[in-house]
Image (cartoon, rainbow, N blue to C red):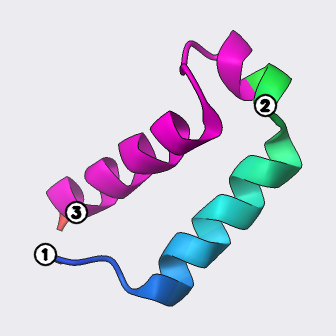
């Protein structure tokens, strides 16, 4: 997969929002956006 569809980006954002900023920062990410980009990068590398 070279490009992530917008619907998948929205779902990743919803998951990140549900997890919450405090938890994401505790996981070592600087922000929700950084978390989302890491997940998208993992998805595009896996396929």
Disc 3 to disc 2, C-alpha distance = 24 Å
User: Helix, strand or loop at disc 1?
Assistant: loop
Above or below for 29 versus 37:
above
Label whose residue precedes the other's in the sequence (2 or 1): 1
Q: Residue 9: image x %, image y %?
A: 51, 72
Q: Residue 40: image x %, image y %?
A: 37, 57
Above or below for 1 versus 7:
above
User: Helix, strand or loop at disc 3?
Assistant: helix
Label whose residue precedes the other's in the sequence (3 or 1): 1
- Residue placed under numbered mark 3 in the picture: 44
Q: How many marks?
A: 3
Q: Residue 13: image x %, image y %?
A: 65, 61
Decide if residue 38 is on the left or right side of residue 3: right
In the rendered image, residue 40 lying in the magenta stretch gets the answer yes
User: Helix, strand or loop at disc 2?
Assistant: helix
Disc 3 to disc 1, C-alpha distance = 6 Å
What is the span of residues highlighted in magenta in the rendered image? 24-46
Decide if residue 43 is on the left or right side of residue 13: left
């Amino acid at each position: 997969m070279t490009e992530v569809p917008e619907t998948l980006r929205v779902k990743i954002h919803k998951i990140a929002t549900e997890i919450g900023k405090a938890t994401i920062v505790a996981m070592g990410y600087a922000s929700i956006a950084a978390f989302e980009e890491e997940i998208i990068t993992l998805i595009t590398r896996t396929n």
